[in-house]
Image (cartoon, helix red, strand yellow):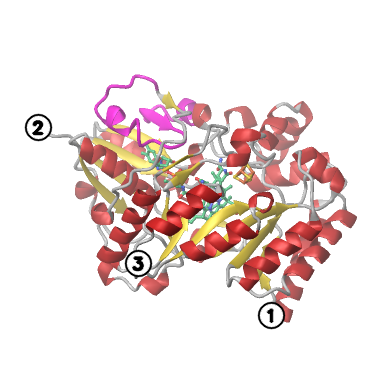
């Protein structure tokens, strides 16, 4: 008899600062559609449940052979509860998603009822896991698997066609995976991106996927989640050429300011890119040295002006609390960003660095005995075995240890900036803290 697997998004039970994950708007769990497609090809029946959107009886939820949860930070506590219950019912149990990155060993050690802890893209391995062909409990570094070119949202239980699509900002798509910078110079200090070569589908299958979602569900806005959208002119040109005529969709993509030049911006516009998320990170030279980057302010301004001229919104992200940072440097960055928001469609974000597990900043803490002791005192837990580290504590400890910044002063400065922007009607965007 065929195996059945249930892939589940647990309830979001945590707030972060003042906000909840839902402040960003709900999106269907497209990441699980990629896995469902791989399972379907292997002849495994899959159902996807998002418990934030639908009520399911326990009997129905656990009526399967294998049970997997996909967790972000805010869904982790409920995810563990579900897995414990699933194991009591004798099911094979799996966990994956952003929360597992860099914490695989701690999760596996603390939660013996989980059969497999998966970190990173799982498309290539999911069927073997469900079929019991993998004995490892920790499965990681699967690489930047080229995305499926034939996903459909058929497994999502919600009637997407009946939903009010305006409620979504963008539907995430993963036709590109990985980051050019991470695979070349290495990942940025605060980022957990892996360092394998980026992978992507062909231009033809890129549009096939979008056209099919557009036809079936009327979705017009897509968010390509690959950490950097390719900027090689030849590939962008092929996207322009393969774009189906009459397809009216817009795309939001990630990019890096160094890779953007007039040619790319022109091609972005012809593809239908309507918004670009650009990591500026910082403009201070001592901070940039730590990041292995240089900054070219006239280039940044030219890029922003060109994006505005093409009607492409720009979300510019700065990061504070990188080693070498000072309050004077923070103010300089804020002043620079206040100049940039004068361009049409520009929004800026100024978060403090969060040393997420899997990043070099997290590893710095892991190697710093004094910081580990400080973490134990404040959080009451041992970082080495903590499967669910307190990111706001880690952020404060990191910033205060490696910079001359005081976290409270930094937070007030950033909040003052946010209030000023709101009062001026100028664009900021929010991060979870
Ligand atoms: C889109 C995105 C967001 C959006 C989310 C929108 C949405 N609702 O979908 C927003 C802006 C809200 C966001 C917020 C944040 N994000 Co974010 N985000 C991303 C991004 C760019 C794409 C995620 C995605 O859709 N990927 C594509 C899908 C296909 O991949 P996937 O989700 O990883 O799923 C695959 C695997 O994880 C695995 N998998 C997933 N579930 C399961 C389940 C099972 C059972 C198995 C076996 C496998 C499995 O298989 C899937 C298919 O291969 C990633 C980076 C990236 N490129 O992946 C960062 C990323 C996930 N974000 C990150 C961070 C740090 C944050 C924030 C903390 C940022 C901040 N300072 O506020 C917040 C936290 C939000 C929260 N609630 O926890 C980090 C997480 C690092 C970590 N170790 O925890 C990432 C990895 C970026 C990075 N490189 O550092 N983010
Ligand atoms: S922060 Fe952006 S550019 Fe840096 S490694 Fe991560 S995804 Fe790549």
Q: Is residue 95 visible?
A: yes
Q: Is residue 216 left or right of residue 373?
A: left
Q: Please tell me in which quadrant of the rendered image residue 157 appears.
A: bottom left
Q: Most extreme residue toward the top, as rendered? A: 135
Check disc 2: other Cα within 10 Å, few if <14, some if 14-19, many if 20+. few
**Place of residue 15 in the rendered image (x, y in percent of width and height, measured from the top left):** 54, 57
Which numbered dot is residue 245?
A: 3
Residue 123 in magenta stretch: yes
Query: In which quadrant will I find the N terminus?
Result: top left
Per the model, the C-alpha gap separating discs 2 and 1 is 60 Å
Marks 3,1: beta carbons within 8 A: no
Secondary element under disc 3, as helix, strand or loop, is loop
Q: Is residue 419 left or right of residue 232?
A: right
Choose between 35 and 146: the one closer to the eye: 146
Q: Earlier in the sequence, mark 2 or mark 3?
A: 2
Range drawn in magenta: 107-136
Secondary element under disc 1, as helix, strand or loop, is loop
Per the model, the C-alpha gap separating discs 2 and 3 is 45 Å
Relative to 11, is 416 above or below? below
Marks 2,1: beta carbons within 8 A: no
Secondary element under disc 2, as helix, strand or loop, is loop
**Place of residue 57 in the rendered image (x, y in percent of width and height, measured from the top left):** 23, 53
Residue that carries the numbered disc 1 in the rendered image: 425
Q: Is residue 273 visible?
A: no
Q: Most extreme residue toward the right, as rendered? A: 328
**Place of residue 29 in the rendered image (x, y in percent of width and height, measured from the top left):** 37, 53
Per the model, the C-alpha gap separating discs 3 and 1 is 37 Å
Q: Is residue 313 left or right of residue 121?
A: right
Residue that carries the numbered disc 2 in the rendered image: 1
């Amino acid at each position: 008899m065929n195996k059945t697997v249930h892939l589940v998004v647990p309830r979001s039970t945590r707030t972060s600062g003042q906000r909840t994950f839902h402040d960003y708007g709900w999106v269907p769990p497209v990441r699980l559609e990629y896995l469902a497609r791989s399972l379907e090809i292997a002849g495994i029946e899959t159902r996807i449940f998002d418990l934030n959107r639908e009520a399911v009886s326990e009997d129905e939820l656990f009526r399967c052979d294998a049970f997997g949860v996909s967790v972000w930070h805010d869904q982790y506590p409920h995810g563990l509860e579900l897995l414990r219950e699933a194991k009591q019912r004798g099911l094979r149990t799996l966990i994956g998603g952003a929360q597992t990155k860099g914490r695989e060993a701690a999760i596996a050690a603390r939660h013996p009822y989980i059969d497999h802890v998966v970190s990173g893209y799982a498309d290539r391995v999911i069927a073997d896991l469900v079929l019991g062909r993998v004995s490892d409990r920790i499965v990681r570094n699967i690489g930047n698997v080229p995305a499926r070119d034939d996903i459909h949202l058929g497994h999502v239980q919600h009637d997407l066609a009946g939903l009010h699509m305006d409620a979504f900002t963008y539907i995430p798509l993963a036709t590109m995976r990985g980051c050019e910078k991470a695979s070349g110079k290495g990942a940025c200090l605060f980022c957990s991106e892996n360092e394998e070569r980026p992978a992507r589908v062909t231009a033809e299958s890129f549009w096939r996927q979008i056209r099919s979602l557009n036809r079936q569900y009327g979705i017009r806005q897509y968010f390509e989640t690959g950490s950097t959208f390719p900027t090689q002119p030849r590939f962008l040109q092929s996207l322009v050429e393969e774009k189906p005529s009459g397809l009216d969709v817009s795309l939001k993509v990630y990019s890096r300011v160094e890779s953007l030049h007039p040619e790319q911006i022109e091609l972005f516009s012809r593809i239908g890119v309507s918004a670009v998320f650009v990591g500026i990170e910082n403009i201070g030279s001592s901070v940039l040295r730590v990041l292995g980057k240089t900054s070219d302010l006239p280039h940044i301004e030219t890029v922003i002006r060109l994006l505005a001229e093409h009607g492409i919104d720009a979300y510019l992200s700065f990061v504070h609390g990188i080693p070498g940072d000072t309050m004077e440097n923070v103010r300089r960055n804020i002043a620079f960003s206040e100049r940039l928001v004068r361009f049409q469609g520009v929004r800026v974000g100024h978060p403090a660095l969060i040393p997420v597990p899997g990043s070099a900043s997290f590893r710095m803490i892991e190697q710093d005995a004094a910081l580990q002791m400080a973490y134990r005192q404040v959080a009451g837990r041992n970082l080495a075995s903590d499967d669910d580290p307190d990111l706001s504590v880690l952020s404060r400890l990191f910033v205060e240890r490696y910079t001359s910044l005081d976290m409270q002063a930094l937070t007030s400065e950033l909040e003052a900036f946010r209030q000023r922007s709101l009062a001026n009607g100028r664009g900021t965007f929010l991060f979870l803290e």
